[in-house]
């Protein structure tokens, strides 16, 4: 998703990259409403527009074939193609025509209820609080008009894809606006892309037990389509404890046409595992970091703790072992954790990590750059677990693990957020695939300062610490061919100029503060 506001034309006049403009317009309409609350207002309308557009497209086709016996009001015609049935009172033309009516809030609530009534998979999913007095109806009407413009003028009927992209962009913007709380439902797209590119989930069961708004699944589906596969080749399994986030995930999958099993309701993964018997081919996740209130006392003898009982005060290794427990015999897992998971020895964590390493299932560790998340400044890493390193598809990597140090990668997209570039993602993923021996991935070589294939004995020598910087070393410094006796005078002159500029700026700041009546120490006469 473009974040720089640059526009890119897509098929027949629809403009992709216009999401930032839409966001700015939608943000103006929210008045004083809290971002966390406004999120459901906006995303609910985008979802309603999406299912109405999909329905309308099929409706027009059936109407054109009425002479052949097709019935545009036959619900089975839609459900047979996984298209949601949209009752008349919920169709977008009707909603749009009544956008300026004082009763528009109740009309939308009724529309949402009607859609849920006629589509069992959406039961208890859609927001239905548009009639509340605190939601300004004039602003709501303006928002309906704005959402109504999405996908219009697209000659190739790609409005559904455009709506999906807008939905995803708005999710990211709401996460940014909400700060720490926003991170509970949204993982930055570049991290999801990297996980998916490394795992390559072409076929099989894909599992995320803390799925947030479902971004891992959406990106997995996109990966399959971009690589010539079929979305039907994967089965989606997920779980989410937060009820509002669970609803966002259900809507996010539906708007992408992905059929996923997220359970019949939200539930805590540790205490009520909705997929207890699942053995997944791929596990991909971003669990809560360093969770100290996860109910450890009730799970002391849980069969998932094969490598050691996780400490009460930190759920990191409870998540790691949950992922491992749900992997199929040749399954792969890729997940995000706080950096402390690579080196902590407190409360038995070091012993659990050692047991996992000695089981020879740690496949790859990636140290990530800072400032990637909206929700935290905690440095993070990526873990990759392989239940079978002797998998016939790849080179035999038993007794080895790959370490990648990506801390210097990425670019700043604003003052506080960093993003991995497409080139960064490609470099990291291709390094992993070449090390694993994937065909057409090229020959693997250690690169000082970036990647290193280490043996289990080497990891043992480092005290079972998994921090990539310990293994990859420091990249070689390029000789600048400048003699020391020439370089030092030049650097000293630059430093002198910087001292002068610093003194000038200090004097200006002191003067301005004094004019405001806030003279700092040393200025008072």
Image: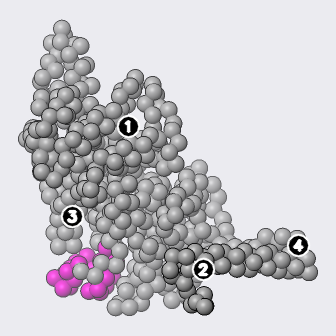
Residue with the mark numbered 2: 510
Alpha-carbon span between mark 1 and mark 3: 27 Å
Q: How would you classify the magenta stretch by its main secondary structure?
A: loop
Q: Quadrant of residue 205?
A: bottom left
Residue with the mark numbered 1: 162
In terms of depth relative to the viewer, which is nearer, 524 or 94?
524
First reached walking from the N terminus: tag 1 or tag 4: 1
The local crowd at label 3, few if under 14, some if 14 to 19, many if 20 or more residues have their Cα within 10 Å, is some
First reached walking from the N terminus: tag 3 or tag 2: 3
Q: Quadrant of residue 514?
A: bottom right
Tag on residue 199? none
What range of the chain is rendered magenta?
A: 294-319
Q: Is residue 7 above or below residue 353?
A: above
First reached walking from the N terminus: tag 1 or tag 2: 1
Q: Secondary structure at mark 1?
A: helix
Q: Secondary structure at mark 2?
A: helix
Q: Position of residue 511 (x, y in %)?
A: 61, 77
Tag on residue 242? 3
Residue with the mark numbered 4: 482
Alpha-carbon span between mark 1 and mark 2: 52 Å
First reached walking from the N terminus: tag 3 or tag 4: 3
């Amino acid at each position: 998703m473009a974040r720089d506001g640059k526009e890119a034309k897509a098929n027949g006049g629809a403009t992709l990259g216009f999401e930032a403009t839409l966001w700015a317009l939608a943000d103006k309409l929210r008045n004083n409403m809290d971002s966390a609350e406004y999120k459901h207002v906006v995303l609910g309308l985008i979802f309603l527009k999406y299912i109405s557009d999909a329905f309308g497209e099929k409706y027009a086709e059936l109407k054109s074939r009425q002479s052949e016996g097709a019935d545009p009001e036959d619900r089975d015609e839609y459900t047979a193609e996984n298209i949601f049935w949209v009752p008349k009172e919920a169709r977008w033309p009707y909603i749009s025509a009544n956008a300026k009516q004082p009763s528009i809030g109740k009309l939308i609530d009724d529309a949402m209820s009607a859609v849920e009534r006629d589509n069992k998979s959406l039961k208890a999913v859609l927001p239905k609080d548009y009639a509340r007095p605190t939601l300004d109806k004039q602003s709501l009407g303006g928002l309906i008009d704005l959402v109504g413009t999405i996908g219009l003028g697209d000659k190739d009927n790609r409005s559904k894809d455009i709506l999906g992209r807008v939905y995803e962009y708005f999710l990211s913007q709401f996460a940014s606006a909400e700060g720490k709380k926003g991170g509970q439902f949204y993982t930055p797209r570049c991290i999801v892309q990297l996980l998916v590119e490394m795992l390559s989930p072409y076929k099989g069961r894909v599992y995320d037990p803390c799925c947030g708004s479902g971004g891992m699944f959406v990106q997995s589906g996109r990966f399959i389509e971009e690589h010539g596969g079929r979305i039907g080749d994967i089965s989606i399994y997920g779980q989410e404890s937060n009820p509002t986030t669970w609803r966002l995930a259900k809507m996010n999958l539906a708007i992408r046409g992905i059929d996923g099993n997220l359970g019949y309701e939200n539930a805590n993964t540790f205490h009520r595992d909705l997929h207890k018997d699942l053995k997944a081919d791929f596990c991909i996740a971003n669990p809560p970091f360093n969770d100290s209130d996860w109910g450890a006392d009730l799970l002391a003898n849980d069969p998932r703790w094969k490598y050691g009982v996780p400490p009460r005060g930190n759920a990191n290794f409870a998540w790691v072992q949950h992922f491992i427990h749900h992997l199929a015999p040749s399954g792969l897992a890729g997940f995000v954790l706080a950096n402390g998971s690579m080196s902590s020895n407190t409360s038995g964590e070091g012993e659990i990590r050692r047991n996992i390493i000695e089981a020879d299932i740690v496949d790859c560790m990636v140290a990530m750059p800072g400032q990637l998340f909206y929700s935290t400044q905690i440095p993070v890493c990526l873990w990759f677990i392989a239940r079978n390193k002797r998998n016939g598809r790849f080179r035999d990597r038993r007794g080895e693990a790959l370490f990648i140090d990506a801390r210097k990668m990425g670019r700043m997209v604003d003052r506080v957020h960093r993003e991995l570039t497409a080139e960064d993602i490609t470099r990291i993923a291709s390094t992993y695939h070449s090390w694993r021996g994937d065909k057409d991935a090229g020959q693997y070589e250690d690169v000082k300062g970036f990647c290193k294939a280490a043996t289990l004995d080497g990891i043992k020598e480092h005290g079972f610490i998994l921090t990539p910087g310990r293994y990859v070393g420091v990249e070689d410094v390029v000789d600048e061919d400048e003699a020391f006796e020439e370089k030092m005078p030049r650097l000293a002159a630059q430093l002198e100029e910087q001292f002068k500029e610093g003194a000038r700026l200090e004097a200006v700041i002191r003067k301005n503060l004094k004019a405001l009546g806030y003279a700092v120490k040393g200025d008072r006469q």
